[in-house]
Amino acid sequence: MRALALAAAVLLAACQTPPPAVPTPTPTRDPNALEVTVLLDLSGPDAALGSTQRAAMQAWSDRRTGTPRVRVGYVDVAGGEARLILALKRAVDERADAVVIGAHVRYGELVAQAVAAAALPVLFTLPIADPSGGPGARWAFALAPTADAVAEAVADDADARGLLGAALVLSDGAASGAAERLALLGALRRHGLVTAPLVIDPREGQRLVRVAAVAARSVFFPGTTAAYTAATSGVPPTTPATLYLSYLTTDADLLALRDAGTVVSWPGSRAAADAGVNTIAATAGDALAIVAAAYARAEAPVTGERLRLALETLTFSGVATRYTFAPDRRAGAALDDLALLRWSAAAGAYAVPAPRNER
């Protein structure tokens, strides 16, 4: 029944996006090991996010000692939703114990149904809509703050600093950033700013970004930060605007922005910043640690159902935050750790929690 449901989800996704071939891992099942399949964009537009997470997970695996043994297989799902759902089905066929999705995905009905049909724990490391109460809720675990929580934190920060009087939202128009754009626009609207995003070509938008940064007090860039680094890196030091980047900001993005002269801010983990670790990398490492901790406490022999039960009653202190799940709580991050981080080439600061009460 589970295979039929997943096959139906794959066929439905295929009608929307023709799936490219998915590289198939070649695991040899070890009955005494925890088998985790990780789905990442490793060759597409979000490859920087994928490589950051894979490096963090490999570092965690290299440090790992004790039981259970954790075997991790990485699958490149660049190419769209259909490819991700097909990879999820193959993880089920290959008897994975859990799946970690670190690809930038819109958690809508199609993905939720695929998670429900998989009937094994699926952990998401990047912000998604709150999966609580949806069709895949029993099996979905959101490790990052939800997209709405992230957007609200950004709007709160800009409002507290008095930066919404003259604000612009610039977008590359990418489909993968649609959920983040909608969440941000909704949060800004609740703070009294009604605006529509101005769509730009990030490769040719440097002049427009410079003008916007002079004319506005704040400029928002929803979507993967890597898409905007070329357009934002040349903003002059005298520019008064604060540039608000995405939660999806990696160390490579910050390195690319080393010449930006204005204030650059983005939402992320206060705990990870205090530890000197990138939020995306910290959450990826936490994902493996959480599954291993749940597997160790699950009743033997460990099944998908028993692992799910162990996860949803787990409180785990990770590098990025403290995670708490429950049957009616599938977004586990502690929002106390969600902060606006700041970096400025002029000041030399790096990923420090943004100071408060600057209004």
Image (cartoon, rainbow, N blue to C red):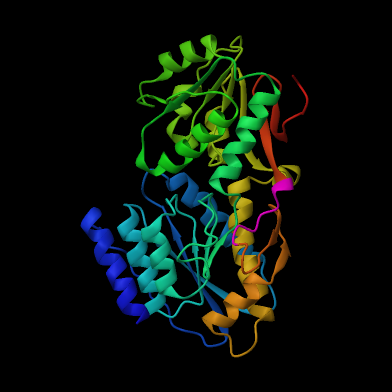
Q: Position of residue 296 (x, y in %)?
A: 67, 79
Q: Position of residue 109 (x, y in %)?
A: 39, 58
What are the residue bounds of the magenta stretch?
A: 330-336
Q: Position of residue 33 (x, y in %)?
A: 56, 82
Magenta: main secondary structure equals loop
Which residue sits at x=54%, y=54%?
130
Residue at the extreme bottom: 301
Location of the N terminus by quadrant is bottom left
Q: Position of residue 205 (x, y in %)?
A: 39, 20
Question: In this rendering, does residue 17 appear at all?
Answer: no
Residue 258 placement: quadrant: top right
Is residue 26 shown above or below 57?
below
Is residue 316 shown above or below 237?
below
Is residue 355 shown above or below 262?
below
Which residue sits at x=54%, y=36%?
246
- Asked whether, in this view, residue 49 is left or right of residue 314, the answer is left
Name the foreground residue: 191 vs 211. Answer: 191
Location of the C terminus by quadrant is top right
Magenta run includes residue 331: yes
Q: How many marks?
A: 0
